[in-house]
Image (tube, grey):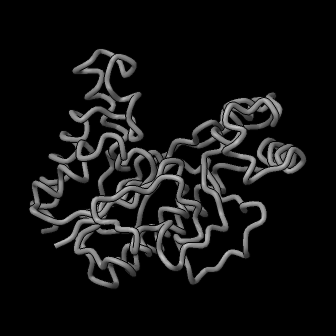
Amino acid sequence: MLLAVCGCSWSCRDPKHPDIEFGKHLSNMLGYDYVNIAKPGCSNFGIALQVEYALEHYNPDLFIINATTVTRGEFKLLNSNRYDPTKGFDNVDHDHVVSEKFTHQTAPGFGKGYDPTIFVDSFGGVLDDSVDKSFEDHRLLQRYEKVFTKNSYDVFKKWFLYHFDADLERHKQQMILTYVLYKLQNKGKKFIFSPNTFDWAECYDLKSSVESSYAEQETQWDIPQQNMQRRGISEYLDVVDRIYGKWEDSPGPNYDHHLPEESHIEYANTTFKQLKEYIL
Protein backbone atom coordinates (compact mmCIF):
# COMPACT_ATOMS: atom_id res chain seq x y z
CA MET A 1 0.00 0.00 0.00
CA LEU A 2 1.26 3.46 -0.88
CA LEU A 3 0.55 6.90 0.61
CA ALA A 4 1.11 10.03 -1.51
CA VAL A 5 1.39 13.52 0.01
CA CYS A 6 0.78 16.55 -2.22
CA GLY A 7 0.93 20.23 -1.32
CA CYS A 8 3.24 23.18 -0.77
CA SER A 9 6.01 23.76 1.79
CA TRP A 10 3.80 22.91 4.78
CA SER A 11 3.50 19.33 3.47
CA CYS A 12 6.99 18.85 2.07
CA ARG A 13 9.89 16.62 3.08
CA ASP A 14 12.97 18.59 4.17
CA PRO A 15 16.08 17.01 2.57
CA LYS A 16 18.26 18.10 5.49
CA HIS A 17 15.76 16.94 8.13
CA PRO A 18 13.89 13.96 6.66
CA ASP A 19 11.46 11.70 8.47
CA ILE A 20 10.01 14.32 10.83
CA GLU A 21 7.23 15.45 8.45
CA PHE A 22 3.65 14.26 8.93
CA GLY A 23 3.73 12.10 5.80
CA LYS A 24 6.46 9.92 7.25
CA HIS A 25 4.74 9.63 10.63
CA LEU A 26 1.39 8.84 9.01
CA SER A 27 2.91 6.20 6.72
CA ASN A 28 4.50 4.54 9.76
CA MET A 29 1.15 4.50 11.58
CA LEU A 30 -0.56 2.96 8.56
CA GLY A 31 2.25 0.57 7.65
CA TYR A 32 2.28 2.06 4.12
CA ASP A 33 5.09 2.95 1.77
CA TYR A 34 5.29 6.68 1.20
CA VAL A 35 5.90 9.18 -1.59
CA ASN A 36 6.03 12.94 -1.01
CA ILE A 37 5.67 15.25 -4.02
CA ALA A 38 4.93 18.48 -2.11
CA LYS A 39 6.98 21.49 -3.16
CA PRO A 40 7.74 24.74 -1.29
CA GLY A 41 6.15 27.75 -2.96
CA CYS A 42 3.90 25.55 -5.08
CA SER A 43 0.72 26.97 -6.57
CA ASN A 44 -2.64 25.22 -6.49
CA PHE A 45 -2.30 24.40 -10.18
CA GLY A 46 1.08 22.88 -9.34
CA ILE A 47 -0.53 20.82 -6.57
CA ALA A 48 -3.13 19.55 -9.08
CA LEU A 49 -0.22 18.54 -11.33
CA GLN A 50 1.35 16.71 -8.37
CA VAL A 51 -1.80 14.63 -7.95
CA GLU A 52 -1.84 13.73 -11.63
CA TYR A 53 1.88 12.91 -11.54
CA ALA A 54 1.35 10.58 -8.58
CA LEU A 55 -1.53 8.84 -10.34
CA GLU A 56 0.50 8.29 -13.49
CA HIS A 57 3.82 7.25 -11.94
CA TYR A 58 2.86 5.65 -8.61
CA ASN A 59 -0.87 4.88 -8.56
CA PRO A 60 -1.09 5.42 -4.76
CA ASP A 61 -3.77 3.82 -2.63
CA LEU A 62 -4.19 6.93 -0.47
CA PHE A 63 -3.66 10.68 -0.98
CA ILE A 64 -3.26 13.44 1.60
CA ILE A 65 -3.62 16.80 -0.16
CA ASN A 66 -3.18 20.21 1.47
CA ALA A 67 -4.05 23.21 -0.73
CA THR A 68 -2.23 26.53 -0.62
CA THR A 69 -2.89 30.26 -0.78
CA VAL A 70 -4.41 31.66 -3.99
CA THR A 71 -1.74 34.38 -4.30
CA ARG A 72 0.65 32.09 -6.08
CA GLY A 73 1.16 31.50 -9.75
CA GLU A 74 3.04 29.96 -12.62
CA PHE A 75 5.73 31.87 -14.51
CA LYS A 76 7.30 31.00 -17.85
CA LEU A 77 10.99 30.23 -17.56
CA LEU A 78 13.17 32.36 -19.79
CA ASN A 79 14.63 30.51 -22.78
CA SER A 80 12.57 27.39 -22.15
CA ASN A 81 10.56 25.28 -24.55
CA ARG A 82 6.80 25.65 -24.83
CA TYR A 83 4.67 24.30 -22.00
CA ASP A 84 3.69 20.71 -22.81
CA PRO A 85 0.43 19.57 -21.15
CA THR A 86 1.36 15.92 -21.68
CA LYS A 87 4.37 16.30 -19.35
CA GLY A 88 2.32 17.68 -16.46
CA PHE A 89 4.39 18.21 -13.32
CA ASP A 90 7.58 17.63 -15.29
CA ASN A 91 7.01 21.13 -16.72
CA VAL A 92 7.64 22.55 -13.25
CA ASP A 93 11.13 23.69 -12.29
CA HIS A 94 11.82 21.32 -9.40
CA ASP A 95 14.30 23.21 -7.26
CA HIS A 96 12.96 21.15 -4.33
CA VAL A 97 11.19 17.84 -4.53
CA VAL A 98 12.41 15.17 -2.13
CA SER A 99 10.75 11.85 -1.46
CA GLU A 100 11.48 8.59 0.26
CA LYS A 101 10.38 6.78 -2.91
CA PHE A 102 11.93 8.93 -5.63
CA THR A 103 14.92 7.59 -7.53
CA HIS A 104 16.91 9.23 -10.30
CA GLN A 105 14.70 7.43 -12.81
CA THR A 106 11.33 8.34 -11.29
CA ALA A 107 11.64 11.63 -9.42
CA PRO A 108 10.20 14.79 -10.94
CA GLY A 109 13.23 16.69 -12.13
CA PHE A 110 15.11 13.54 -13.06
CA GLY A 111 12.76 11.55 -15.26
CA LYS A 112 12.94 11.25 -19.03
CA GLY A 113 10.00 13.62 -19.35
CA TYR A 114 11.57 16.37 -17.27
CA ASP A 115 11.73 19.53 -19.34
CA PRO A 116 10.96 22.51 -17.09
CA THR A 117 9.03 25.30 -18.74
CA ILE A 118 7.42 27.02 -15.73
CA PHE A 119 8.41 28.26 -12.30
CA VAL A 120 5.84 28.25 -9.47
CA ASP A 121 6.06 30.55 -6.47
CA SER A 122 4.17 32.89 -4.16
CA PHE A 123 3.72 36.49 -5.19
CA GLY A 124 5.19 37.54 -1.86
CA GLY A 125 8.40 35.72 -2.70
CA VAL A 126 8.49 37.08 -6.24
CA LEU A 127 7.97 40.64 -4.96
CA ASP A 128 10.38 40.16 -2.05
CA ASP A 129 7.48 41.27 0.20
CA SER A 130 7.63 44.82 -1.14
CA VAL A 131 6.15 46.51 -4.21
CA ASP A 132 8.66 49.35 -3.84
CA LYS A 133 11.83 47.30 -4.21
CA SER A 134 13.62 47.20 -7.56
CA PHE A 135 14.43 43.93 -9.30
CA GLU A 136 18.16 44.54 -8.94
CA ASP A 137 17.77 44.77 -5.16
CA HIS A 138 15.87 41.48 -4.81
CA ARG A 139 17.51 39.39 -2.09
CA LEU A 140 17.05 36.28 -4.24
CA LEU A 141 17.94 37.89 -7.55
CA GLN A 142 19.75 34.84 -8.92
CA ARG A 143 16.69 32.68 -8.29
CA TYR A 144 14.33 35.00 -10.15
CA GLU A 145 16.61 35.92 -13.03
CA LYS A 146 15.61 32.66 -14.69
CA VAL A 147 12.04 33.99 -14.86
CA PHE A 148 12.19 37.79 -15.18
CA THR A 149 14.06 40.58 -16.85
CA LYS A 150 13.92 44.00 -15.21
CA ASN A 151 11.19 45.10 -17.62
CA SER A 152 9.04 41.98 -17.27
CA TYR A 153 9.39 42.17 -13.47
CA ASP A 154 8.02 45.72 -13.50
CA VAL A 155 5.16 44.59 -15.74
CA PHE A 156 4.29 41.75 -13.35
CA LYS A 157 4.34 44.15 -10.40
CA LYS A 158 1.86 46.48 -12.13
CA TRP A 159 -0.36 43.55 -13.13
CA PHE A 160 -0.47 42.40 -9.52
CA LEU A 161 -1.22 45.86 -8.20
CA TYR A 162 -3.93 46.80 -10.66
CA HIS A 163 -5.38 43.65 -12.21
CA PHE A 164 -5.00 40.69 -9.86
CA ASP A 165 -8.23 39.87 -7.99
CA ALA A 166 -7.89 37.29 -5.21
CA ASP A 167 -11.65 36.60 -5.02
CA LEU A 168 -11.75 35.77 -8.73
CA GLU A 169 -8.56 33.74 -8.48
CA ARG A 170 -9.89 31.76 -5.55
CA HIS A 171 -12.87 30.61 -7.60
CA LYS A 172 -10.67 29.68 -10.58
CA GLN A 173 -8.26 27.72 -8.42
CA GLN A 174 -11.10 26.00 -6.58
CA MET A 175 -12.33 24.71 -9.93
CA ILE A 176 -8.82 23.46 -10.79
CA LEU A 177 -8.49 21.55 -7.52
CA THR A 178 -12.06 20.26 -7.75
CA TYR A 179 -11.17 18.66 -11.08
CA VAL A 180 -8.44 16.47 -9.57
CA LEU A 181 -10.60 15.69 -6.52
CA TYR A 182 -13.35 14.47 -8.89
CA LYS A 183 -10.70 12.48 -10.75
CA LEU A 184 -9.66 10.71 -7.55
CA GLN A 185 -13.29 9.88 -6.78
CA ASN A 186 -13.88 8.56 -10.30
CA LYS A 187 -10.86 6.29 -9.92
CA GLY A 188 -12.06 5.07 -6.54
CA LYS A 189 -9.02 6.49 -4.73
CA LYS A 190 -9.02 7.10 -1.00
CA PHE A 191 -8.03 10.64 -0.04
CA ILE A 192 -8.20 13.42 2.51
CA PHE A 193 -8.27 16.98 1.24
CA SER A 194 -7.65 20.08 3.33
CA PRO A 195 -8.06 23.67 2.11
CA ASN A 196 -5.18 24.48 4.48
CA THR A 197 -4.19 28.08 3.58
CA PHE A 198 -6.54 28.31 0.57
CA ASP A 199 -8.79 30.95 2.15
CA TRP A 200 -5.85 33.19 3.11
CA ALA A 201 -4.50 35.57 0.46
CA GLU A 202 -0.83 35.69 1.39
CA CYS A 203 0.85 39.06 0.70
CA TYR A 204 -2.40 40.57 -0.63
CA ASP A 205 -1.91 43.49 1.74
CA LEU A 206 0.88 44.63 -0.61
CA LYS A 207 -1.95 46.02 -2.73
CA SER A 208 -2.82 48.57 -0.04
CA SER A 209 -2.26 51.44 -2.47
CA VAL A 210 -5.27 50.29 -4.51
CA GLU A 211 -8.49 48.45 -3.76
CA SER A 212 -7.48 45.22 -2.04
CA SER A 213 -10.49 43.96 -0.13
CA TYR A 214 -10.64 40.18 0.11
CA ALA A 215 -13.64 38.21 1.28
CA GLU A 216 -12.20 35.58 3.60
CA GLN A 217 -15.34 33.49 3.90
CA GLU A 218 -14.88 29.74 4.17
CA THR A 219 -14.81 28.12 0.73
CA GLN A 220 -17.25 25.24 0.27
CA TRP A 221 -15.96 22.09 -1.46
CA ASP A 222 -18.06 19.57 -3.35
CA ILE A 223 -16.57 16.39 -1.91
CA PRO A 224 -17.89 13.81 0.60
CA GLN A 225 -17.58 15.05 4.17
CA GLN A 226 -15.46 12.09 5.21
CA ASN A 227 -12.81 13.21 2.71
CA MET A 228 -12.80 16.79 3.98
CA GLN A 229 -10.40 18.07 6.62
CA ARG A 230 -10.98 21.73 7.49
CA ARG A 231 -7.94 22.09 9.74
CA GLY A 232 -4.84 21.66 7.58
CA ILE A 233 -1.20 21.19 8.52
CA SER A 234 -0.50 24.95 8.66
CA GLU A 235 -2.99 25.36 11.50
CA TYR A 236 -0.86 23.16 13.73
CA LEU A 237 1.19 26.23 14.49
CA ASP A 238 -0.85 26.32 17.70
CA VAL A 239 1.11 23.27 18.84
CA VAL A 240 4.25 25.36 18.52
CA ASP A 241 2.80 28.08 20.75
CA ARG A 242 1.73 25.52 23.33
CA ILE A 243 5.14 23.82 23.52
CA TYR A 244 7.66 26.53 22.66
CA GLY A 245 5.83 29.75 23.46
CA LYS A 246 6.41 31.22 20.01
CA TRP A 247 7.42 29.98 16.58
CA GLU A 248 10.77 31.81 16.60
CA ASP A 249 11.87 29.80 19.65
CA SER A 250 10.99 26.47 18.03
CA PRO A 251 12.99 24.43 15.48
CA GLY A 252 10.37 25.40 12.85
CA PRO A 253 12.34 28.26 11.22
CA ASN A 254 15.08 25.75 10.33
CA TYR A 255 12.76 23.46 8.38
CA ASP A 256 11.40 23.76 4.84
CA HIS A 257 7.97 22.77 6.18
CA HIS A 258 8.08 25.45 8.92
CA LEU A 259 6.97 23.22 11.79
CA PRO A 260 8.71 21.21 14.51
CA GLU A 261 8.14 17.47 14.69
CA GLU A 262 5.57 17.81 17.50
CA SER A 263 3.21 19.66 15.12
CA HIS A 264 3.63 17.02 12.44
CA ILE A 265 2.98 14.21 14.90
CA GLU A 266 -0.23 15.81 16.16
CA TYR A 267 -1.47 16.41 12.60
CA ALA A 268 -0.58 12.82 11.66
CA ASN A 269 -2.49 11.53 14.69
CA THR A 270 -5.60 13.56 13.78
CA THR A 271 -5.42 12.43 10.15
CA PHE A 272 -4.90 8.80 11.15
CA LYS A 273 -8.01 8.94 13.32
CA GLN A 274 -10.09 10.38 10.48
CA LEU A 275 -8.80 7.76 8.05
CA LYS A 276 -9.55 4.89 10.38
CA GLU A 277 -12.99 6.18 11.34
CA TYR A 278 -14.32 7.15 7.92
CA ILE A 279 -12.12 6.04 5.01
CA LEU A 280 -9.99 2.93 5.56
Which residue appears at 55% of the width and 64% of the height? 45
Which residue appears at 41% of the width and 62% of the height? 221
Residue 18 shown left or right of residue 96 in the figure: left
Which residue appears at 16% of the width and 67% of the height? 279
User: The C terminus lies in which quarter of the figure?
Assistant: bottom left
Residue 215 shown left or right of residue 54 in the figure: right
**Residue nearer the viewer, 209 or 122:** 122
- In this view of the protein, can residue 198 be seen by the observer? no
Find residue 158 and report its horizontal and vertical position in percent: 85, 44
**Residue nearer the viewer, 213 or 176:** 176
Find residue 153 and report its horizontal and vertical position in percent: 82, 46
Relative to 207, say whether 6 is above or below.
below
**Residue nearer the viewer, 270 or 151:** 151
Relative to 127, say whether 4 is above or below.
below
Which residue is at the far right?
Answer: 151
Q: Specify the quadrant of the image occupied by residue 62.
A: bottom left
**Residue nearer the viewer, 139 or 261:** 139
User: The N terminus lies in which quarter of the figure?
Assistant: bottom left
- In this view of the protein, can residue 32 be seen by the observer? yes
Find residue 68 and report its horizontal and vertical position in percent: 48, 50
Find residue 195 and report its horizontal and vertical position in percent: 41, 53
Which residue is at the far front?
Answer: 104
Which residue appears at 27% of the width and 74% of the height? 60
Residue 74 shown left or right of residue 20 in the figure: right
Relative to 174, say whether 188 is above or below.
below
For the image, the number of numbered tags is: 0
Relative to 92, say whether 233 is above or below.
above
Q: Specify the quadrant of the image occupied by residue 66.
A: bottom left
